[in-house]
Amino acid sequence: MFLQLFKVWIGVFSVSFLFLPILLVLDWRKRGTAEGFSSVVLIIPMIIQAFWLRHGWMTNDTTQILINSMNISVLSCYIAAYAYYQPKRKFLIGQLISALLIIKCAFLYVDSHDSEHMESAMGTIAAGAQILGLGGRIYEIRRAIKMGTTEYIPAVMQFAVAALMAQWFIFGIVTGNKFIVFRSPTLPD
């Protein structure tokens, strides 16, 4: 019973993160531009969510399927809003093409494994991508130092992600899912 309640809680809590970027969109709307903001904080999570969605399908984990399907759908809307408010779309288009290539290559790699190892390979890629997703945060910190301002780093999102990370870590331990335990350094942005 506890595990079912925890699954519902972590699902609702994770899905609530879908609404945090609304603050960014409202800021872009107020400014009339998304210039100065980075699309990296939207693109990297989309790649990671695609990996976790495929892992969810492979393991028949409805919680992962639901959360990651919703995350990808809503992230796509935020990316569209970013594209609308961003006058320089060249980098965004390049990042989206790169993201699709990364996803395709990862899926091809997983498909090259025999059927008994595919699930583990996808879990390893998803967890590894989650950890490598920290690169997006490092990129944002580097940009802030270079620009001399933290104006474009949404602090509320950073603190909220820390709370979510802890809960996913606990969830991974409780369910015995080593991939979720290793994924917890970052979670859906």
Image (cartoon, rainbow, N blue to C red):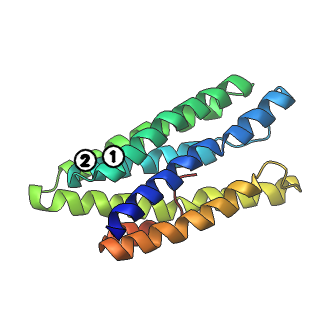
Q: Residue furthest front?
A: 1
Left or right of residue 21, residue 172 in this image = left
Residue 65 is labelled as 1
Marks 1 and 2, how far apart in space?
6 Å
Give amino acid for label 2.
Trp
Residues marked 1 and 2 touching at CB (< 8 Å): yes
* Quadrant in which residue 158 is drawn: bottom right
Q: Is residue 15 above or below residue 187?
A: above
Question: 19 or 148, which lies in front?
Answer: 19
Q: Residue furthest right?
A: 148
Quickly name the residue at label 2: 57
Q: Residue at x 37, y 58 (%)?
A: 126
Residue 34 visible to an observer of this rendering = no
Disc 2, SS: helix
In the rendering, at what x and y percent does residue 39 appear?
64, 41
Q: Residue at x 38, y 71 (%)?
A: 172
Badge 1 local density, few (<14 within 10 Å), some, or many (20+)?
many
Q: Earlier in the sequence, mark 1 or mark 2?
A: 2
Location of the N terminus (image quadrant): bottom left
In the rendering, at what x and y percent does residue 130 appear?
47, 60
Badge 2 local density, few (<14 within 10 Å), some, or many (20+)?
some
